[in-house]
Image: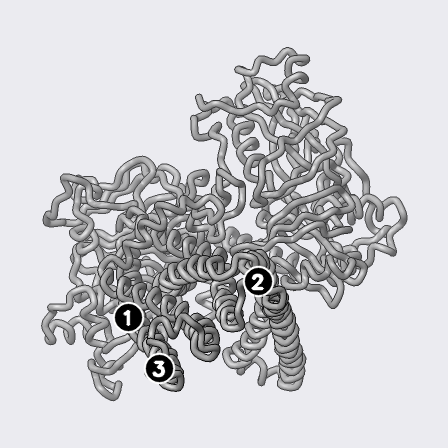
Amino acid sequence: MNNKNLQNDIIIQQQKMTDDALEMRFIDNSNAVFKKTKGGFLSVEFNGAYYGRVCVCQTFPFTQPGKFISLRENDEKGREIGIIEDMSKLDEASRALIEEQIKLRCFMPVITKIVNVKDKYGFAYFDVLTDRGECRFTAHIFSGDIINLGDKRIIMKDVDGNRFEIPDLSKLSSSERKMIEVFI
Amino acid sequence: MSEITIPKSIKPELEKLGLKLSEIIFCCYADLTPDASFGSTWVVLTKEKLYLMKGDGSVMIRTFSGYPGTRSEPDAMNFTTETFSFNNLDEVFIIHQTVGGVLCLKDKSGEEKELCVFSSKYTVSFQQCRKICTKLINGEELSELDLKNEEDERCCPKCGAIYPDPARKVCPNCLDRRSVITRFMSFCAPYKSKLIIASICVILSSVVTLITPYLNGTVLFDNILSKSPAVTKLFGPEPNFPFLLLLCTAAIIVSQLIFQLLSLFKSLAVRIMSPSVIRDIKNKVFKSMSKLGLSFYTNHQTGSLLNRVLNDAQEITDFLVEGVPQFFSNIFLIIFASAFMLILNWKLALFAIISMPILIFIFQRATRTWRVIYSIRSKRERKLSSIINDNITGARVVKAFGSEKTETANFEKNSIRLRSSEIDIRKQNAKISIATTLIYDIIYYGIICLGGILILSGDSLDYGMLVTFTGYVSLLNQPMQYFSNFFNWSSYAMTATQRIFEIIDTQPEIVDSENAVNREIKGDIEFKNVVFGYLKERDVIKNVSFSVKTGHMLGIVGHSGMGKSTLVNLLMRLYDVKSGEILIDGVNIKDYSIDCLRGNISIVSQETYIFIGSVLDNIRYARPDAGFDEVIRAAKAAYAHDFIMKMPDGYDTIIGSSQRQLSGGERQRISIARAILANSRILILDEATASVDTQTERAIQSSIDKLVEGRTTISIAHRLSTLKNADDLIVIEDGRIVERGTGPQLLEKKGVYYKLYQLQTKSLAMRGLEE
């Protein structure tokens, strides 16, 4: 009898986990409170539960950067707490908190000027000015590290995975465009 | 203890804190700030404390990994320092982010705090930092390895540039060219005579080309047509001028003929040499590659590696048989043409020689533009062919979702792009050829004009000499083109050579020890405190011990990725253990010769590999000398005989190519037959039935049961039904043995095994209902 119970427990547990993974939970100001902890992390109180250090993930970082923000628990399993459907519908303070997290989470300097690009043996060496200072980085040319989003926007990953963004190609001068033309 | 380098800019601050440099055991740098901009923060560790030093005022260029040039040390001042004592800490951890991460700590009161933010460049050093902190908090001993400053192995230590091929550490910027050239020439040592013939032909033909302008300029115009006194001196007072004219013309034609013959000889020599050299290189590479351990293949993407090796071979050979002889002939041409020009008329010669660099410059510009537009085109070509490829391999999906139209539109869009790129090439080609021709013409007519002025002014210059002169100028055209591209070409060839040598020179990691012996194996297996990791810093197997007696069967259970297959790799000595030992019949496996060890172990794994060839060849793979009756017996034991006989040519049917598709179960049974025929003492079943349906599994299971009889067997499975015959079971989790015992004993324990068992019997029961 005891065995039977244990058996059922395991099955029920399993079932619960599956259901949990399948459910869509939307978070907004009506059911959640966002706060910054003393240590500098984002905490959220949602449906009566408190989560001390929340991980903020963009579901569509390139196509829908401000929508469908997934909040996840901080342990290894990273269970999803819920999804913020639209950041613009949050109040000012919460939005600022989450935006700060996103900005930190996906550190991505914006390239304002291309000083020089050299390519050699399959790698491109960029010397650029960004909104956060001059950067020099190396990108692999043929491995899809230079991502074309639409006709104008470009995101480049360096060999470590650091990212750099060109939000609008047409705003670069023609000589700058010429330098990176080959890679895009 | 290994030395650590402490950045200059934090030394004053360390002094202020009263920290001795010798106390510091580790130091790392974080380049970001919590508000996602660049900053400078150092984390300094001593055995007792963690110092977090935030600096500001750092205006510098941020250089990320792989960018060549001198490393400028991050500079900062006005530090604010926070100190944390390991006694008060509970945990130091890293939150990984899309880019880089955040180093955080948790103190004894449970409060968590953000320390510093770093980009991906520093992830590795912060992981090391976290590891050290964890050990210090737990009071564990630190090893040398923990504190060792890891160099970035992807980059050249000299210049900082990333290696073009991460697996082959060759920096084209820092190559020792001389030694490479010496080894490079060793490739053609066997073909010395042919290379010499080719070079002689090339040089002779340049001599001939040097003669021609002289003949049709100075000799024809100045001596014969203008009936110069030099001719009368040579051929008497009344020479037959029409005859001399014919003679001269004949000489020109003969010299052209000789020129053509020489180039014929040269290309014959090259044609013979080039495939032979390529063959030699390929053979050498394949031979040394097959000697290398498995880790070599897992570190390299094998297919692309082989391809690149073959490309490299082609590149080297082209340079060797075309580039090298041309190099000599072009040098020869430049020297002699310039010398002749100087002798003929130094004023004109100076003008011509000065204009040469302009030509080189133009050609170089042209090559660069070409490279750009051609690489754009090849990129678009690749894109187009990948669409075609997608549509062929994914035809089922495309049709099932009815997206033919979208795919067609997509294809058209990309093919238009390719077209515009082709047009670009044509346009650019036209532009470049006009530009170069124009520049060249300007120089050419400039010389004629200058020559004309010299003639008019009564200088010692004749018409014919001017013709000769312009002839030489046009001769220089080719060497200019050659040298404008030479440096690129040669450096590509050098790098290719270096990469080839990299493979040839790699030493196999696993070799027979000096006193390795062949001996009879009974089949007692024992693992003693085995520790192993594919990467230095991460252990996959952590202190595992178990033993299997001769003829017994051990089942290994565990989730995927927990290190089960690694145990097998270690037993086969595809890798060597980091510490601990593996014994067979009480003897360390390192003391068996590799042939003997692997010859006594056969393996049936989830990935069955069928070689291209007949069924017979495939079954006999491990024992090519096995008799035909034995092959049939093995196939019968593996329940493979019947389906083999249904094939059109029985055991002689060619399989492994696309000619005949085998089902997963059939492939599996052929590989079981292979293992049965091998008849080795130790048998390893690595998820042997994982990829087949329940029905086939039952059939295979019974062939496996036959196979297992009388052998020492290690069976890995996550389907527990496979292990019902096992004498002993061990459960592996995260590289450790968490449970061991017989099946019923483990069920008693109600641990990991029990949980797995319950879940599987439930789902099996469900499947049973459906059937």
The picture quadrant where one finds residue B50 is top right
Tell me the chain of label 1.
B
Residue B660: % across, % down: 33, 82
Name the disc covering residue B269, or none. Answer: 1
Q: Which residue is mark 3?
A: B247
Q: Is residue B164 left or right of residue B75?
A: left
Residue A177 higher or lower than B58, as above or below: below
Name the disc covering residue B459, or none. Answer: 2
Judge by depth and name the residue closer to the eye, B726 or B277: B277
Give, as a three-letter code, the residue at label 3. Leu
Give, as a three-letter code, the residue at label 1. Ala
- Which residue sits at x=55%, y=54%? A120
Give, as a three-letter code, the residue at label 2. Asp
Circle 1 sits in a helix, a strand or a loop, which is it? Answer: helix
Residue B242 higher or lower than B422, as above or below: below
Q: Is residue B493 left or right of residue B32?
A: left
